Image (cartoon, rainbow, N blue to C red):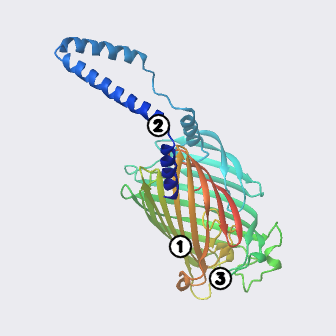
Amino acid sequence: MAGQYTSLQAILRFSREIPKDMLRIIGRCFVAGLSFSLVVSMSAFAQQGDDTSRAIEQTRLQSEKAQQLKPVTENKAEKLAEKVETSGLVGGVARSGLYPWFGSILGGGGVSVGGGYRLRFGDSGVFNVMGAWSFQNYKMLQSGLEFPEFADRRVKVNLGVKWLDAPKVSFYGIGNKSSKDDKTSYLYRPTRVGPNVTVKVAKWFSVGGGAEYLNVQTGSGDEGTSIEQIFTPPTTPGLGQDVSYGVTRAFAAIDWRQSPFYTRRGGLYRAEFSNYRQGGSDDFNFRQLDLELQQYVPLLRENWVLVFRGLSSMTMTSGNSQVPYFMMPYLGSGETLRGFQNRRFRDRNMLLFQGEYRWTPSHFIDMALFVDTGKVAATRGDLNFDSMRTDGGIGIRFHGPKFMALRIDLAKSNEGYNLIFSTGLF
């Protein structure tokens, strides 16, 4: 409103400075234009009796105009957006063959580049294999097999394999009051393999689940102070240990966004329950419930959009079981608390709220003002609004009609500034 009020003042001030001679000229031009319009109208009214001649002339003019029309073509930006969407660089229906890739292997790993090979088969089946490397020396190999959808395209089954090597993941200690001065790093190397199934019950409603084998290796970090130099097993569950899990999960989701990769209206409401059973021991058995809500409220023909997101992760254990530090929910990244360093806070439970105001200065660019607030806690009862960590900032999004190509956010918190590059919606 302040900007609009300033613009109105400028217009009024400008109008008072217009010379009187110019006002008289404008007035005369207005009168002349009005007189001309009246003459044309009267002339047309006088000639309305000659219907046959007018019809012939109109047909001739339309024929000449049709010969001069050029086919509608996409501009260069639209062609580029289409190529990006089908290349495999971002989400979308991509073609078969080799493709480049960029994005993030894991939060905090920096910009990652790579490539892969995709083979489409059947009606909607896809085989994909990909490898990537980041400038922080993070590495990833993954392969997936999506079988053709069946049961009237309502059931989708896929099998995935993924290996990740992250040698310098940040760790600051456990709890909402951990200190940024206690920053350490550790090796995080998970391998996972297993099938998943999704059943589309209705247009916007789906359920599903899966099972996987998960093996996690940990060790000393390659950056700065290594984790074992400051923290000990009594205060850091799972320190110095590798674990293997049999994981089962189930989810339900209502998703009426335009696209999961970019949208200006709709919403996502999702709940997922996972059970982690350790092989050969019950020291680190736990269960986890993840809840997510996204809501997009368009204003003024979607030129302005209000975005709201809520996220919560809660873990549960039985007996003397614990949740390993490297499996705990966390906050502090390009997807959560953007004004804090990656994985700045972690504990057994997490709560996050985010809000954004987005506007569209051009067809493929969005600007945004945002605020994030959240906390981690040892118990679910402590997931309240006390001692919330908060940040805010401004961002720019480069996107196509159905995908996010690049998101850049500059966020400010009480621990300083943080610049984020990402391809995610948040």
**Residue beneath the point at 57% across and 83% down:** 386
> What amino acid type is highlighted by mark number 3?
Asp
Disc 1 and disc 3: Cα gap in Å?
24 Å
Precedes in sequence: disc 2 or disc 1: 2
Q: Is residue 147 above or below residue 73?
A: below
Horizontal and vertical percent position of residue 365? 56, 47
From the viewer's perspective, tell me whether residue 88 is left or right of residue 157: right
Q: Between 332 and 193, which is closer to the camera in this rendering?
A: 332
Indicate which disc residue 312 carries.
1
**Callout in the foreground (2, 1):** 2
> What amino acid type is highlighted by mark number 1?
Ser
Disc 1 on helix, strand or loop?
strand
Q: Between 241 and 80, which is closer to the camera in this rendering?
A: 80
**Residue beneath the point at 58% across and 74% down:** 374
Disc 3 on helix, strand or loop?
loop
Most extreme residue toward the front is 20
Q: Is residue 342 above or below residue 303?
A: below
From the viewer's perspective, tell me whether residue 230 is left or right of residue 25: right
Horizontal and vertical percent position of residue 125? 51, 46
Residue under label 2: 20
Precedes in sequence: disc 1 or disc 3: 3
Report whether residue 426 is seen. no
Quadrant hosting residue 348 = bottom right
Report whether residue 411 is seen. yes
Horizontal and vertical percent position of residue 230? 81, 80
Indicate which disc residue 283 carries.
3
From the viewer's perspective, tell me whether residue 324 is left or right of residue 310: right
Most extreme residue toward the bottom is 319
**Callout in the foreground (2, 3):** 2
Disc 2 on helix, strand or loop?
helix
Precedes in sequence: disc 2 or disc 3: 2
Disc 2 and disc 1: Cα gap in Å?
66 Å
